[in-house]
Image (cartoon, coloured by chain):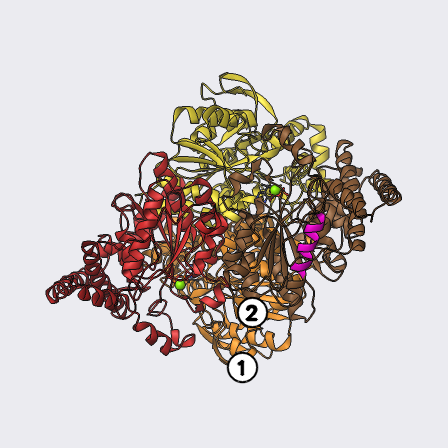
Chain colours: A orange, B yellow, C brown, D red
Amino acid sequence: MTATTPNASMSMAQALNAALRDALREDERVLVFGEDVGPLGGVFRVTDGLTKEFGEERCFDTPLAEAGIVGLAVGLAMGGFRPVIEMQFDAFAYPAFEQIASHVAKLRNRTRGRLSLPIVIRIPYAGGIGGVEHHCDSSEAYYAHTPGLKVVTPATADDAYWLLRDAIADPDPVIFMEPKRLYWSKEETSTADRRAAGFGRAAVRREGRDATLVAYGPSVPVALQAAEAAAQDGLSLEVVDLRTIVPFDDETVVASVRRTGRCVVIQEAQGFAGVGAEIAARVQERCFHSLAAPVLRVTGFDIPYPPPILEHSHLPDVDRVLDAVDRLQFDDEPDLLHLTREAS
Amino acid sequence: MTATTPNASMSMAQALNAALRDALREDERVLVFGEDVGPLGGVFRVTDGLTKEFGEERCFDTPLAEAGIVGLAVGLAMGGFRPVIEMQFDAFAYPAFEQIASHVAKLRNRTRGRLSLPIVIRIPYAGGIGGVEHHCDSSEAYYAHTPGLKVVTPATADDAYWLLRDAIADPDPVIFMEPKRLYWSKEETSTADRRAAGFGRAAVRREGRDATLVAYGPSVPVALQAAEAAAQDGLSLEVVDLRTIVPFDDETVVASVRRTGRCVVIQEAQGFAGVGAEIAARVQERCFHSLAAPVLRVTGFDIPYPPPILEHSHLPDVDRVLDAVDRLQFDDEPDLLHLTREAS
Amino acid sequence: MSVRRSPRTVEGLLPSPEPVRFVAEDGTAVEPPAGYAEPTGEHLMEAYRRMVLGRRFDRQATALTKQGRLAVYPSSRGQEACQIAGVLALREDDWLFPTYRDSVALVSRGLDPVEVLTLLRGGWHCGYDPAATRVAPQCTPLATQTIHAVGMADALRRKGEDGVVMAFIGDGGTSEGDFHEALNYAAVLRAPVVFLVQNNKYAISVPLAKQSAAPALAYKGIGYGIPSEQVDGNDLVAVLSVLDAAVAHARTGGGPFLVEAHTYRMDPHTNADDPTRYRESQEVEQWESADPLARLETYLRGRGLLGAEDVAAAHKAAEEYAARLRDAMNADPEADPFELFDHVFAEPTPQLNEQRALLASELTARED
Amino acid sequence: MSVRRSPRTVEGLLPSPEPVRFVAEDGTAVEPPAGYAEPTGEHLMEAYRRMVLGRRFDRQATALTKQGRLAVYPSSRGQEACQIAGVLALREDDWLFPTYRDSVALVSRGLDPVEVLTLLRGGWHCGYDPAATRVAPQCTPLATQTIHAVGMADALRRKGEDGVVMAFIGDGGTSEGDFHEALNYAAVLRAPVVFLVQNNKYAISVPLAKQSAAPALAYKGIGYGIPSEQVDGNDLVAVLSVLDAAVAHARTGGGPFLVEAHTYRMDPHTNADDPTRYRESQEVEQWESADPLARLETYLRGRGLLGAEDVAAAHKAAEEYAARLRDAMNADPEADPFELFDHVFAEPTPQLNEQRALLASELTARED
Ligand SMILES: Cc1ncc(C[n+]2csc(CCOP(=O)(O)OP(=O)(O)O)c2C)c(N)n1
Ligand SMILES: Cc1ncc(C[n+]2csc(CCOP(=O)(O)OP(=O)(O)O)c2C)c(N)n1
Ligand SMILES: [Mg+2]
Ligand SMILES: [Mg+2]
């Protein structure tokens, strides 16, 4: 692990590891715990080496009980610590849902700000890695819909480092959703000088004129690939990476869509009442008179996550995104659209 | 309780009681259980008298553990029964979230349809009754976002009866959300002849020309009052009551909005990533060219449910709805809107 | 205590076969099991005064519900010995994690009664300062607070403080998964936490027999390696003795301790409840004779510690306290709607600021 | 068994102080505690054949992961005595609620091994028919299945069947709140369910000492009023004897029973795991000498029940079974993407039909 090399090519898992390591070093109130995060280093190795470097007191395995992990974090945070906890997989955070929704999200408010809970709950989420059932849920909307929680999801290793540092430094609870399938994607990452945008700000990952693709987490690379493919068809797509779902960066998203006049929202989760619905609703509320077409959504289907052999049919891919872009009514005669574009 | 009188003025609680009673009578596989649903008859008296009439074997108190209640229902349903269970309050269903999301919602799919779970989970929800914290959550979006669950919420006593009968008869799990503050509102109700629309269909509660208000559960009376008030200002508002959130009745909603050209969605829950977002997103996707203004949302704030003394500031009321209607751009010169409307 | 308890052996973990008792129902002394010390007379006199005050507070709170000054009140009547012994066993720098039922414990710990009742009158969620009082917000989601208590106990240990945490929970609450997780975490972490189960025989309408088939709830301890005890919860002397020992055990590095206090909820679950639907009034009457306050009073008189003037003084203080509370509760609680946005996060999000502005415009419009 | 167990008394609920054993590690007989009967020789011979087959299946499954024919496999190696005794203790009309770890139990119950492996090869979630086999889908969300088992047991009782349900769970799973709720519901409902904890000493990387401080996990029973036992999980004779008694207890109206089987996970958690990070290979080697199959073989040979030809026949059958499995797994699993929409509900919603149409158009476009 390369926490000590400030600029290096890192995988997202390594960047997260570096962020935890640096946070543990800088602030002795930071504690890391969860299932298998100790000697094993976590099933995705995000906590690799931390127990060795910081000892069992700072990074430790808990008994196997997620409400217990979150509840323990609540008590420790009330007592002045800054727990950074891991839920092993998305669906295994559900046993802690009451602790998260009824306590983590609410304690500051319940006590008029006399108590605060600087807790980070790390959740590897979403699919695309051939995982079996219960290991691939996209659960971000449950948290985003719960007032009192910030919800963050990086799409690059550099963002992973800085968003996690920001989350740990935040005075309030942060649900930190880690897109599993990006754990191994490598990138030039700086742990010394902040390159990433600040907490709460979206990032324009690619500039474009004709339409805006809004994405987050695992869907950002899909959006970028779609934009690349569209460029070859002569369409210039802007790609906005939300980075933080709560708080939501209306400013960046609205500015983009007002300029492009068209918008496709991409979300891996099942569509119904997901974060993508919120984005679509907000965008049309705020950009109605700039819109040349409805805001379209590209999402997973409203089905339980498929078995590995079928997940590619479910996951929004470049083609599904491009199909949606095709439906953005770039032409008065949509049937001729293909011809028009091919000609251009 | 008046289950035997087929046409009578009933409160919603009484109508639900009648539905449970009639279901218990007609199908011996139906079981009712939960916390305090036995001799006490439930804290809202929805199960009043059922243990007395049907015995402890059919309607019984469980130990105090919500994952236990839901898990027990799963096992009983696998064994051929049709459990109708009560979560005492919205926030007290959260301990069962894993059982609901990972099992109730998924078992049919996991087993390729070899097992099904005809379970009804009744959840008194939302606020407006001066309840203290954790007793007033609007949690419908958590379930609506979970594939494999049907989500139902009645707004009238007649619907309460029929939707609950339909839910119990349904081969799949139904989350039955009961708006607490409507428990006591009385209405002419028929338990003999179905008046209500079928399961999965929305109901147009009031016809109108100028804009569509889409609401469900506790917000339906608010929408109707707003329409009434607007009528006095010369505006004709249509009110659609969803009745079932999943499945969603696109047909009725879309037909209405295409006709009126304007839409306000009303939802008591905190707005962000709620069901209202889904409705707004769908409506603009499907009615874009009919819309004269953005689809607006009127919701609770993105805050933990307030203490009783402040809940009226949080809850969407007639004024908040009318303010949104005012923003629907009925005029090219919105500032003159008031004058125009007053003149008409 | 330390003699009887050798954790990790079966005998060291099981509770006494019968609830520990120092004082019989008629107020006479009985022989307690070996290893338990009787609290000092001074300690018991202090307990008596707090019992009188606590009972008076409780009565006043119930009265306030009838006058519409309190939305809802879950009474502690009958459980005062548990709650007051719990508080007396703690130092000021120890922490308490109470439930909605434990208002008497809170006022007994010296919290402002109006602040305590803020939740139940609907003014805000938690009315007192948990950090200053070292009392966690009264908890409604059952059993969830027991895990927080473990976390706090671990925090105290980490900071090198010798503080102890006490978590209250009801018989019904013990059925929740969170209680199990809390006991297990406490044992594995050897956290300095004492769990006090107030087994008042009901969870709203559900009697103990439908809640558990255990010989006693205290037998849950051994399954986690936690030493446990059961005690007559209406015998203040016994509860205090057992809790003193349990707290000492936790404070001196012995790890967690589980105590089940057998008591009874004399009043309805809350003022909104109708207990005639699920229990006989005879049952309640029988428990009247086990009243913890009368029992303590008889015992202390019998031991010559309590005189008529002490009784009078305690009651006078309690009456004055109740009168002050009544007056204070006569005023409507203040409420600022914009506070709704103040504590969601340390800094409001842009979205919350927009919503605050929306509310402001609504309120201005209403004023017009 | 019924002699030793008088529920609701403390002694009737506690497990034996040491794990029940019939056969020592070297395969010689030892004196079991009173009240336990040795299974018949026929029963033990059947167990032996299934052990040989189960072990071979397990080895084959692990091999299939290396050939990329199985995405992931959590091995049962070392735990065969628990799983096979569990299956042997059940009748065909009893129900089993297994975890992901228990594939050997399933094939031992006669399920089609390809159907069993459907989950782990990624073809669908549950490959067999739970209704026909009376085996619930292998459960991954830990401990959740134990409550389902209680519900099923209650369903059997309600229908007047004398069936019994057995729920498997790991040592780690016992820490989850759902296990607590399941035990309590089972006890209060007096459900005919047997909980078998396969304490294989690890939850992925987390050793038992970090999981629980209890003297043994079997001591959890008394806290619910559930009679409990602990047994040497690598002694097939003992596990079968204890489970036979537990099942008889449940079948005859005695209510639930909790058994802890002390065993060891010989292989990594799954093929994807790296146990060198958290345990010493010496520890694993030590457990080799406690191998359940070798022990049973030595014992049966010693008793003159098992001859060389029986051994050879068992291994031959196992090899044939493995070869058939290898062949069957060589074909890619079939998958119809439209099936994704078929089982969400009995009738697809209009929304699902739209989404199905979207997928159809995508697939058509890809073909073009
Ligand atoms: C998780 C959860 N489920 C349900 C409730 C509703 N409820 C409030 S009090 C109560 C009974 C609690 O009984 P017990 O634990 O014995 O405490 P007591 O009220 O007797 O003090 C119930 C069911 C709740 N508050 N939290
Ligand atoms: C609720 C939940 N949390 C976490 C996991 C991830 N997980 C899978 S297996 C496992 C360890 C289970 O250990 P144990 O119960 O001892 O069973 P074993 O694997 O040893 O058979 C964990 C943590 C899960 N499947 N479910
Ligand atoms: Mg109680
Ligand atoms: Mg294990």
Residue at image point 42% right, 49% down: D227
Q: Chain of mark 1?
A: A
**Above or below A131: residue C301:** above
Same chain for the residues under marks 1 and 2 in the image:
yes
Residue drawn where x is 63% and y is 61% of the image: C1
Residue closest to the eye, B92 or D23: D23
Crowd around label 1: few <14 · some 14–19 · many ≥20 (10 Å) = some
**Dot 2 falls on which chain?**
A
Q: Nearer the viewer, residue A138 or D129?
A: D129
Q: Is residue A301 left or right of residue C38?
A: left
Q: Is residue A175 above or below residue C76?
A: below
Amino acid bearing label 2? Val
In the image, farthest residue toward the bottom: A5
Place residue D271 in its image quadrant: bottom left
* Residue D118 appears anywhere in the view: no
Residue highlighted by disc 1: A7
Q: Earlier in the sequence, mark 1 or mark 2?
A: 1
Q: For residue A32, which numbered disc appears in the image?
A: 2
The residue positioned 43% from the left and 72% from the top of the image is A185
Tell me where the magenta segment starts and ends, as one range: C236-247
Q: Quadrant of the C terminus of chain C?
A: top right
Q: Is residue C238 magenta?
A: yes
Residue A341 percent across, percent down from the top left:
39, 58
